[in-house]
Structure formats: structure tokens, C-alpha cells
Amino acid sequence: MFRSTTLRLAALYTAAFALSVVVLGVITVLTTRGALSAQFDARIAAESAALVQEYRSEGLNGVVEAVRERDQTPGAIDYGLQGPAGQPLAGRLAPSRAKTGWSVARQGREADAVRVLAVDLPDGYRLLVGDEEERIEALDGALLRGFAGAFVGVVVLGAAAGYALNRDVHRRLAAISGTAEAIIDGDLGRRVPVRGDDDLDRLALTFNRMLDRIAGLMESLKQVSSDIAHDMRTPLTRLRQKLEAGLAAPQERGQAMEGALADLDSILDTFAGLLRIAQIESGARRAAFRPCDLTEISRTVVEAFAPSAEDARQTLRLEGDARAPVVGDPELLTQMLVNLVENALRHAGPGADIRVVASRGEATTTLAVIDNGPGVPSQERERLFDRFYRLEASRSTPGSGLGLALVAAVAKLHGAEVRLLAAEPGLEARVTFPAAAS
Amino acid sequence: MKLLIVEDDKETAAYLKRALSEAGHTVDAAASGRDGLLLAAGETYEVIILDRMLPQIDGLAILRTIRASGVKTPVLLLTALGGIDDRVEGLEAGADDYLVKPFAFAELLARVNALARRPPPQEVRTELSVADLKLDLLKHTVSRAGRRIELQPREFQLLEYLLRHAGRVVTRTMLLESVWDFHFDPKTNIVETHMSRLRGKVDRGHTHELIHTVRGAGYVLREPD
């Protein structure tokens, strides 16, 4: 039973409350009894003093008269007046030989304990005033019963609350545990139910986010494996054919080997690209982030590629030269821009004008590569970021189909959004970064 | 020159040993990190080729130990495909250059040669020259046969790199890394384009060409025969 945290806690709390009820009860009974006894004695003493006063002013007969009169009135206090020989003169209290002062006598209607104050009057007369002690005990008993009831109530309520709490928490933990078990058994789509906004719900949300992340990674892993299997088949087949041709025709061996090496290099390129994307997606590169300037990076890239563009009768230029600061990995950002520029150079066609624009906005910094080539149909644009996805029209041109997938991975790593937009005419690839804190 | 290869794969080690020997080098090979450490500490080599992934001891740990024991021999680190952080880690551990596996042998040879004949670092040079080509590092000017040649900043860097490695083959990747700081392989022929422009400015109109293409390997700038 105590293997449940909630139950253990509930039992502990209940025990603590029950103990405080007991302590409170003891203290209350003790103080109440003290106060009641003092009050009880004070009442008897006051009554006694009043009768002595009566004796002084009215004499013995006055006292006898007063005692008889008081005995008539219904009330709690008992009286007794005895003569010098101990004979009773008036009152219900039997003569007592006890010494002057307070004593306890057993007498009265049911031989109850009576607390008596004896006062000597002149000439051997004696005045007794007393009351049954039971009155105090009755009050004590009522108090004790009250606290006993409270004690039982606390224990019962505590146990009930503990049980209910335990059942609720247990049910919710079982839901989390059940989800985990289901996932272990292969049902990766399962998530922990969330019903409100308390600590367990927040735990469930964190748990679900973790599961989403894992599922995403698994999905991308699965995707990569099937992409590799699918896209490697063609180049590997070609490689094999060249090697076989070289074996079959010794005079063409040199040429076949060269072709095979070229095929192999392109396969390795694809592998390197995939591994690089996977590594970027793992997020480990964020450790290398530092402030950098997109304009500076753009200048380097444009300057490196402008001569090649010129040779292909295209123009490549940088627009604007204001700083466009971001926090990121300059090497990856450079490669991202290189991929975008190479994409434009390759697909915008001869005579195209390609502009690289890095600019800083209010809350964002953007990097855009804009060409005036044929563009891409809108329904195909998003899919271009998938690994190995290529437009029908560009299947014959060289390229691994990984360029934009890497762009997407780098953008995601930097918390940036990358989109392909229609440039009327042409295509604009725009990466929007959250602005760097300056 | 005398080289040390630390590589656990027997086939790779044997191939490299043979090919480097054919290129005129004396080669020792160690199959484990421990043997590599012993050889590196005991013998004098001009270049050490060290595999990053070794059984038992990590290549980087060996590299750090070699450096900690005061061995200053240039180290070429062979790293795994796709490891983006390997380069930085390797250079931090004390490597002088790195090469991603698998690689073309010409690339390895060019890098080994570039490492071996590094000029002593204390030597401050203000002018680089080969034949009648002169590059002034202070004034940032280039001239050939006394005639001034105007170069773009990147072309100047390219020529400076070729001059610093005069007589040795430099590969496309070496140029991408040191001139452009691109540590990935662009699909566009940017090195070729820049090189052809540079050659146009340096060699056009001269009887002897100084910059040559080495097929399957890269470029070399050398004295005319």
C-alpha cells in the first residue's frame, strides 16, 4: 500500500492532523478544567462570605433563616449549619467533623462527591457551603467526547481524501505509463491525455512534446533510409555497369574506370550531403553560433559565383550593403546561400538576372535570392525542400536533389523560415530570420 | 621524405604506403594508436597522417598526447564523411590540416606536400616571386616582367596561395578552403572560373606559362623549364 507516493503522503498528513487534534484536546481540557474549578470554588466562597455577613448583621437566627430560605430556591448549592455539639440546625449538608476550610464529602442525593467549604462561626457554630464536583467532570466529559469525535472525523476524512487523491493520481500516472508501454510496443502515435493545466498536465505536455520530437526524428530517419535505398539504386547500377564494361572490354578500361570514379564521387557526395543534413537536424551545431552579418556572407558568395554566372551569360549581384545581423553558424549560412545561388544559376536559364538581397527589418532579418527565370509552379514549391525531390523538368540536369533540403535544415536550425515565392517572373527564395539582439 | 601513417584498416594502410612510396616517400605505418604514439615520439617524421577513428584510443587523444609531448611534426588528420565538427575539433587538438575520408589519392599527396615544406613560421616575407612574376605583400601589387597586373582581391589571394606553394600541386579543395573559406563542395566550377581569369591576367601574352593545370589533381605554379 505504501508503494504509492500519494497514499503515503495522505497517511502522513492524516497522522499529523490527528496528532494535532489530540494535543489540542489535552490542552483545552486541562485549561478548561482549571478555569472551571476556580470559578466553582469562587462561587462557593462568595456564598459562604454572604452568609457570614448575614451572621454578623442578623445573628444566628438570621443565618438559619437565610439557609432555610436558600434551600427552598431551586439551585445547585447546598448548605449546612451545625451547632457546637455537631447537631444539624439547618440545611441539607450533613454535619461534618472535617477541619475548617476546603474538603470533599461523600453525601447528598446519590452519595456524590461534594466539595465543601467549612467556616467556623463564633460560639462553636459551623457553616458549610458545598456543591457537587460532578458538574466539572460532566463538562470535562463533554469536551473529551467532542475532541474524540473530531479525532475520528480527521482520520476518516484523511483516509477518504487520501484514497480519492490516490485513485485520481494513480489513474493519471497509469495513463502516462500506459502511453509509454504502448509506444514501447510500437504504437508511436500514442500521446498522454491532457485534461487541464496542473503540474501533471504540464508533465504530460512535456512528455508529449518529447514524443513528437522523437517521432519526428524517427520519421526523418525512416524517410532518409527509404530515400537512400531508392535514390542510390540508379547511380549504383550505373557504377556497376561501367565496372562490368571495363572488365569485358580491356581496351576501354581506362575510360570505364574514370566514369566509375565519377559515379562513385557523386554517390559519396550524396552520402556526405545526407549525413550533413542529418547532423544539422540533430541541432548539435547550435553550440557554434555567433553574431554574423548576412550582407558580409552574401558579398563573399556573390563575388565567388559572379564570374561563373558571367560565363553562363547570367548576372549575379548583391543588392544593398547595410548590415543584416543574425546569430548563427557562418559556415552553414554560407553553404545555405551557396545552395540557393547555385539553384538559381542552374534553373533560371541563360540570360537570367539573379539578385541576392540581405536586409534588416523591424523584427526580422531576411536573406533572399531572386531570379527572373521560369519559376516553379506553386503546388510544387514546398515539396522542393524534401530530400531528393526534383522537378520533372530538372531531372536531366546534374544535382543530388539535396540542395534545398540542406537549406531547409540550416534555416530550421537558426529558427528561420524559408519559403519559395513567385517573383513575377521567376522565383524568390526567402529566408526570414528572427532579428539578432543587438 | 619520411612519413608516418597511423591507420587501423590494413588495406587502406597498405595502399597508402605503396602509393606514397611510389611518389618517392619513405613510409612507416602503425596500425594502432599506441604504436603510432611510440613511433611519433621516437622517430623524426616530416608529416604524420593520422586517422581520426582508431580502435581503443581516439585519434584526437593521440594527437593531443603527441602535441603535449612537444612533437611539432605537421599532422594531417583523416576524418569521417559528413562530420561537420570534426575539422574544428581536429584543428583545436593540434592538427595542421584535415582530409575527409574517402579521398582521392592526389588530394592526399598534394596536402602532404603542402604540409611538409611549410616555410618556418618566423620567416616574414614581404615579397613572393617565381621567375619574372612578383607579388608585393605590403603594397598589394603584382607585376610580371616589370609590368603591373591589376587583380581583384580574391585573385590576389589565389595567386598568393599559388606562390606560397610554388612548385607543388594545389587542389581545388585546398583552394576553396584557404582562399574562400568554403568547407564544403560547391557544384559550380568557381575555382576553375577564377583560375582561368587569373591565368588570363598572369600568363596571357607571355611565352612561358607559369600556372599549369595538373589533370585529375589541381594546379601548379612553377618556374618555366
Image (tube, coloured by chain):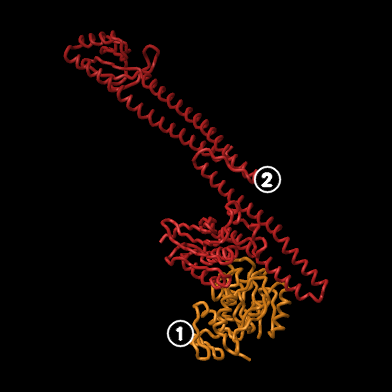
From the top left corner, tell me how far across and down residue A152 is, in percent: 48, 27
Question: Mark 2 is on which residue type?
Answer: Asp
| Residue B153 vertical position relative to residue A229 in the rendered view, above or below | below
Question: Which residue is under mark 1?
Answer: B138
Q: Which chain is red?
A: A
Foreground pick, A176 / A37: A176
Q: Chain B shown in which color? A: orange
Q: Is residue B168 left or right of residue A110?
A: right
Do circles 2 and 1 both sit on a common chain? no
Q: Position of residue A19 (x, y in %)?
A: 46, 34
Q: Quadrant of residue A251?
A: bottom right
Crowding at dot 1, Cα within 10 Å, few <14 / some 14-19 / many 20+, comes out as few
Q: Position of residue A205 (x, y in %)?
A: 54, 45
Give the Cα separation between the discs numbered 2 and 1. 70 Å
In the picture, which quadrant includes the N terminus of chain B? bottom right
Q: Nearer the viewer, residue B118 or A192?
A: B118
Task: Identify the image quadrant of the C terminus of chain B.
Answer: bottom right
Label 2 sits on residue: A185
- Residue at left offset 54%, top offset 88%: B133
Chain letter, disc 1 residue: B
Decide: is A102 above or below A183.
Answer: above
Q: Residue at x 58, y 56 (%)?
A: A376
Q: Amino acid at mark 1?
A: Leu
* Element on which disc 1 rests: loop
Q: Secondary structure at mark 2?
A: loop
